[in-house]
Each structure stands twice: as C-alpha cells, then as structure tokens.
Image (cartoon, grey):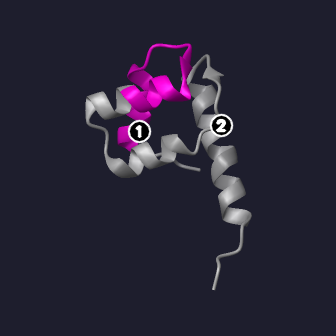
Amino acid sequence: MVLPSTLDRFLAGMEYPASRDDLMREALHDGLALADRDLLSTLPDGTYSARWHVRHALSRAGSAFERVPAMA
C-alpha cells in the first residue's frame, strides 16, 4: 500500500511512541485531510513505536479490506 504523501509527511513528524488515538488527535489538530484521517482510523488499537510500525499496520489493514468482496 502506497500512502498519500501528506499522510507520510504527517507520520514523519509525529513523536513516537504514539497510540491510534494520539495519531487521530494530532491529525485533526494538524488539519490532515479527511481521507488521510479515515486511513488512520483503520489502524488496530494499540501503541506504535515508529513510523514504519504505522505504515506496516496500515498496509495490513488495507490488504484485509482489499480481500473483502464488495456487497452488491
């Protein structure tokens, strides 16, 4: 999964460790786009110790969503 550049820059500027709630709160405070905040909301609840942990979790969440067939 390739992250939008705005989300990638946001994650680079975050202080870690950070929880999903920390990420969501800072994203809202920083005015991150709704689409980027929606991606962050798919993160499993937990604490992330580095940007790569967030990226990995987002890619796993994205893979799970891609496997679910669309409802007709």
Would you identify the image quadrant in which residue 5 lies? top left
- Residue at (49% x, 47% y) in the render: 39
Q: Amino acid at mark 2?
A: Pro
Magenta residue span: 5-25
- Residue at (53% x, 49% y) in the render: 2
Relative to 68, say whether 46 is above or below: above
Would you identify the image quadrant in which residue 10 lies? top left
- Residue at (43% x, 32% y) in the render: 24
Q: Amino acid at mark 1?
A: Leu
Quadrant containing the C terminus in the rendered view: bottom right
Marks counted in the figure total 2
* Residue 51 inside the magenta-drawn segment: no
Nearest the eye: 11 or 24: 24
- Residue at (42% x, 20% y) in the render: 14
Mark 1 and mark 2 lie on one chain; the one further toward the N terminus is: 1
Residue 19 vs residue 5: left or right?
A: right
Relative to 25, say whether 42 is above or below: below
Circle 1 SS class: helix
Circle 2 SS class: loop
Nearest the eye: 27 or 60: 27
Relative to 34, say whether 70 is above or below: below
Q: Which residue is mark 1?
A: 7
Q: Residue 44, which numbered label?
A: 2
Quick check: can you spot residue 30? yes
Quick check: can you spot residue 4? no
Residue 27 pos. (x, y %): 36, 32
Dominant secondary-structure state across the stretch colored magenta: helix
Give the class, few, some or many, for how many residues have Cα within 10 Å of label 1's Cα (few <14, many ≥20): some
Q: CA distance from mark 1 to mark 2?
A: 17 Å
